[in-house]
Amino acid sequence: PPTQGAISGTRLRSVPVANAIALRTDCPHTGGNQWHTEFAPLPSHPPMRLRALLELARLSNAPTVVTNALVGAAIAARVLDRSFDWPRAIGAAAACVLLYSAGMGLNDLVDRDVDARERSGRPLPSGRMSVAAARAFVAIASVAALALLGLLSWPALLAGTVLLASIVVYNLIHQRWAGSVVVMGACRALVPVVGALSSNMPWSAASGWRTIAILGGGLWLYVILLSLVARTEADGHRTPRRSVIAALPLAIVIPLFAARPEAMPQWVLAIAAALGFLSWTLLSTLHLTADPPRPARAVMGWIAGIALFDAFALALLGSPAPVLVAAACWLATVLAQRAIAGS
């Protein structure tokens, strides 16, 4: 029923729409009608809260962060001429997943007004998670990640702090500057740095830093390219540039300048990983040729392809076991994205 507004002469009429209340203001002073929407919290149950948290953190993409950290650990193992340090690699991967999840939560906090208009199903505008809960998650995940890296080594803690700062900077500027995709790519490229320093790669290891620069540069370029396409996803009036799409598979060439396998079985594994990456990237691109085009599906496929890119890098570094883990992470990402959208 109509209710009296706070301003004399203003009447508010409420109409329930799902979890939203559409309000129409009739103002006799201006003679105009104005609609606006307010979201009411939905009933909250443990499974609903858990799903909202997983969507907020975009946890379906987390396995690709794990493979980024494994590349760094493999570089450290190569520099130190020792076996792959699994405990430290796992610790670094866990910390980076926490930082990634915190970054995704911060992204939703910064974009919540835009999401309310364009993506009302996201956890915050839909009312499935409160702003206070999202802020608490971001803070707890960030602190836990830095604490874990601090236990591994102080260089790892320093690298993690730089990564966290980059994540914050990106989220603060991405709506105002199209070039912020450069910062996003840098955030991904920093994950192998965290992985390498967590596995005790020394600061003085020039060959290690050269390898990180090349492999991280390839990852940086790949993420920039897919981010440029992802930006067109939010604007239905723009079509992704063909030159950007065509350049995505070419990123696989860059790791070849970083390392070479030493034995034929490693070459076979590297070639298999490269073919897997190229095939999956092209298969994901086909979503753009569908009628109607499905850019979100293409972007999620390319994100999953990060794990295959890392598998190729790991094969070049002579780390067969992590290659298999990277392949498993690719499959885990593809399957998880069916339940939780990664873009």
Image: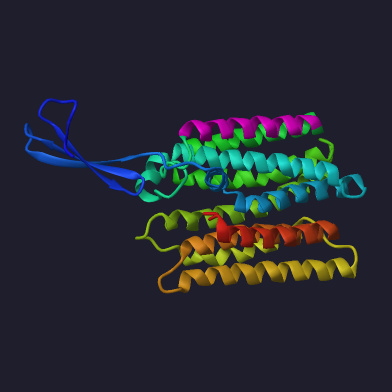
Q: Main secondary structure of the magenta part?
A: helix
Magenta stretch containing residue 149, yes or no?
Answer: yes
Point 74% across, 47% down: residue: 69
Q: Is residue 200 left or right of residue 21?
A: right
Point 85% across, 60% down: residue: 320
- Vertical comparison of 307 with 78: above or below: below
Point 61% across, 58% down: residue: 336
Q: Position of residue 241 (x, y in %)?
A: 45, 63
Q: Position of residue 189 (x, y in %)?
A: 66, 46
Q: Nearer the viewer, residue 340 or 101?
A: 340
Which quarter of the figure has residue 303?
bottom right
Which quarter of the figure has residue 152?
top right
Query: What colour-coding does the image apply?
Result: rainbow
Q: Is residue 100 left or right of residue 275?
A: left
Res 322 seen here: yes
Q: Quadrant of the N terminus?
A: top left
Q: Which residues are magenta?
A: 131-151
